[in-house]
């Protein structure tokens, strides 16, 4: 009995065609942004054009590029992070404002326009200590921020930090 094995392409053309279908244009941009972030971090802040040690200027520049509704949310979240989570360092992560501890992202803000969604989100990575049983939320939809919402976010971030 002869077993046929699938032929493997000697070129990467098939891989490119598959990846073109696998990612949306917005996802491709995010991947490219992440690649740039990694290149800059390897060069170090002193060699990266205009980058500062903690990434705050990059985060503020990214926030400034956002449309008004997303920008207002991102500015308020940034202020909350700086005031209530001083152990977190702002940085860009896949082109999104993020906040890291020891270089590892704990939480991030995704504007609604980034992936053409209905609302912005505040997400937490696996570095966040939000574990609660077998199932717990890690991404929260944001449409507006009231003082009560801000208190909820501050409590979540404090919990995430352990």
Image (spheres, rainbow, N blue to C red):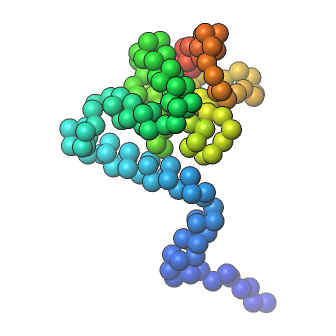
Q: Residue furthest left?
A: 46
Does the rendering let one see residue 133? yes
Q: Write down the quadrant of residue 64 in the picture.
A: top left
At 70% across and 27% down in the image, what residue appears?
137
Left or right position of 109 against 44: right
At 63% across and 83% down in the image, what residue appears?
7
Q: Residue furthest right?
A: 1
Q: Residue furthest front?
A: 68
The location of residue 51, given as percent across then percent down, is 28, 37
Quarter the C terminus occupies: top right
Q: Nearer the viewer, residue 74 or 42?
A: 74
Does the rendering let one see residue 91? no
The location of residue 158, given as percent across then percent down, is 54, 14
At 57% across and 57% down in the image, what residue appears?
25
| Vertical position of residue 57 compared to residue 31: above or below | above
The location of residue 72, given as percent across then percent down, is 52, 25
């Amino acid at each position: 009995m002869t077993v046929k094995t699938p032929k493997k392409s000697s070129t990467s053309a098939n891989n490119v065609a598959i990846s073109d279908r696998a990612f949306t244009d917005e996802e491709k941009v995010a991947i490219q942004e992440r690649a740039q972030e990694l290149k800059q971090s390897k060069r170090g802040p002193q060699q990266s054009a205009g980058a500062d040690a903690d990434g705050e200027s990059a985060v503020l520049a990214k926030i400034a590029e956002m449309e008004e509704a997303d920008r207002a949310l991102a500015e308020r979240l940034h202020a909350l992070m700086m005031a209530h989570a001083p152990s977190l360092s702002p940085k860009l992560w896949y082109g999104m404002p993020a906040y890291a501890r020891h270089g590892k992202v704990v939480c991030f803000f995704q504007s609604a326009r980034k992936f053409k969604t209905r609302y912005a989100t505040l997400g937490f990575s696996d570095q966040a200590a939000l574990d609660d049983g077998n199932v717990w939320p890690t991404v929260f939809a944001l449409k507006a921020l009231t003082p009560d919402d801000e208190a909820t976010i501050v409590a979540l971030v404090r919990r995430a930090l352990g």
